[in-house]
Image (tube, grey):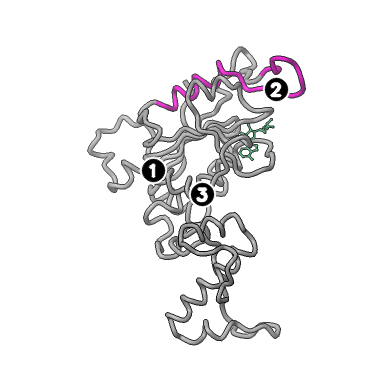
C-alpha cells in the first residue's frame, strides 16, 4: 500500500540492490527501529532529528519509519474517522482503517510483544517511566500508533493487543509529541547513542532517585558559590554529597519515589537523613 518513509541517511529503504552491497556496519542491519503510524508523518523525525538522537539516526544506530494513516483511509476522501457510536462530540478513528495499517506494520517484525512492543499512545495508558524506556530499548524495535480526535475505536486496541502508554495526566491533541518523547527517552539508552554510559547510570530515576544538583564554571556567579565539597577534589566525599542531595531532593519532591527507594534499601522513609 503506501510506501513507508524512512528517516536518517543510513536507514535503508527497500532496495533491489544485491544483499552483499547492503551489508553496512553490523549495527545498521539490526538497528533498533521505531515504526510510527500517524496522520502527520511530516512532523517526524522532528526533534529526534537534532543533536545526539539525530546524529545516531544518521549513523544508523537506530532507524525510524513512518506510515501515513491517510493512505489507509476509505473512499475518495480517504476518510479515517467517524462519529462516535452512542453519540456525543468529536470523531473516532476507524478500526477498518487502523487495523490494516497495523497489520502492514507487523510485516518483518516478531509477534512476541517482548521482542517488539506495539503501543497506542493514550492518556488512559500506564504512565510512561524510565523502566518502560529501558524495556523498549532492549527490544528489536517498537510500533507506535498515534491517535488524533477523540482517539481510536476500542476494537483496534483489542485486535492488536496494543499496550496503552500515557505521557502523563494531561490531554494532548495527538499522539505525535508523545511518540517523539517516548522514542527520545528510549533511543538514548541504546548503546553508543549518548556516547557516555556513565552519565545514564547516575541519572534521575535510573537508581530510583532524582538526580543531585549540577554546577559548572564560574565558581562564584552573582554572589552564589559552588558548594566547597565539589571543588575539594575528594571523589569519595563528592559521591557521598551527591547521594545525600539526591536523597534529600527525592524525599522533598517525590514522596512516592522516596518510599519505594526506602523499601528497596531497608531505610525508614520517615527517619532523619544525615543531610
Ligand atoms: N478523548 C481522549 C483524548 C484524545 S486526545 C481521552 O479523553 O482520553 C487525541 C490523541 O492524542 C489520543 O488518541 C492519543 O494518541 C494522544 N494523547 C493525548 N494525550 C496523551 C497523553 N497524555 N499521552 C499519550 N498520548 C496522548
Q: Which residues are magenta?
A: 82-106
State the mark number for residue 126.
none
Task: Specify whether 181 is left or right of 62.
Answer: right
Q: Which residue appears farthest toward the right when viewing the image?
A: 89
Which residue: 46% across, 27% down? 3
The residue to which callout 3 is attached is 184
Task: Specify whether 23 is left or right of 222.
Answer: left
State the mark number for residue 91.
2
Q: Is residue 128 magenta?
A: no
Local secondary structure at mark 1: strand
Q: Nearer the viewer, residue 69 or 132?
A: 132
Task: Specify whether 201 is left or right of 41.
Answer: left
Which residue: 37% across, 40% down? 140
User: Looking at the picture, how far across and down is residue 34, in whole percent?
Assistant: 45, 39
265 lies above or below 23: below
| Mark 2 Cα-neighbour bin, 10 Å: few <14, some 14–19, many ≥20 | some
Q: Which residue appears farthest toward the top when viewing the image?
A: 75
Task: Specify whether 142 is left or right of 69.
Answer: left
State the mark number for residue 32.
1
The Cα–Cα distance between marks 1 and 2, rounded to whole angstroms, is 34 Å
Q: Nearer the viewer, residue 190 or 40?
A: 190
Local secondary structure at mark 3: helix
Query: In terms of image quadrants, where is residue 79?
Result: top right
The Cα–Cα distance between marks 2 and 3, rounded to whole angstroms, is 29 Å
| Mark 1 Cα-neighbour bin, 10 Å: few <14, some 14–19, many ≥20 | many
Amino acid at each position: 500500500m503506501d510506501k513507508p518513509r524512512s528517516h536518517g541517511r543510513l536507514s535503508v529503504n527497500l532496495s533491489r540492490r544485491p544483499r552483499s552491497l547492503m551489508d553496512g556496519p553490523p549495527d545498521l542491519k539490526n538497528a533498533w527501529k521505531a515504526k510510527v503510524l500517524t496522520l502527520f508523518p511530516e512532523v517526524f523525525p522532528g526533534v529526534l532529528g537534532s543533536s545526539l538522537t539525530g546524529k545516531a539516526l544518521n549513523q544508523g544506530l537506530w532507524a525510524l519509519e513512518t506510515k501515513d494513516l491517510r493512505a489507509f483511509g476509505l473512499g475518495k476522501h480517504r476518510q479515517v474517522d467517524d462519529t462516535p457510536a452512542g453519540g456525543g462530540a468529536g470523531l473516532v478513528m476507524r478500526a477498518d482503517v487502523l487495523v490494516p495499517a497495523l497489520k502492514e506494520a507487523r510485516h518483518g517484525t516478531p509477534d512476541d510483544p517482548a521482542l517488539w512492543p506495539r503501543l497506542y499512545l493514550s492518556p488512559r495508558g500506564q504512565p510512561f517511566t524510565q523502566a518502560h524506556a529501558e524495556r523498549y530499548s532492549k527490544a528489536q524495535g517498537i510500533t507506535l500508533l498515534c491517535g488524533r480526535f477523540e482517539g481510536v475505536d476500542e476494537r483496534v486496541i483489542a485486535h492488536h493487543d496494543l499496550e496503552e502508554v500515557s505521557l502523563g495526566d494531561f490531554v494532548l491533541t495527538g499522539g505525535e509529541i508523545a511518540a517523539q518523547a517516548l522514542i527520545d527517552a528510549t533511543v538514548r539508552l541504546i548503546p553508543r547513542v549518548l556516547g557516555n554510559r556513565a552519565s545514564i547510570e547516575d541519572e534521575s530515576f535510573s537508581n530510583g532517585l532524582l538526580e543531585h544538583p549540577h554546577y559548572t564554571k564560574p565558581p562564584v556567579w552573582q554572589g552564589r558559590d559552588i558548594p566547597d565539597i565539589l571543588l575539594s577534589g575528594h571523589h569519595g566525599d563528592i559521591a557521598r554529597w551527591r547521594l545525600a542531595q539526591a536523597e534529600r531532593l527525592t524525599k522533598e519532591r517525590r514522596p512516592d519515589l522516596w518510599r519505594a527507594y526506602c523499601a528497596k534499601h531497608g531505610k525508614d522513609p520517615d527517619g532523619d537523613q544525615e543531610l
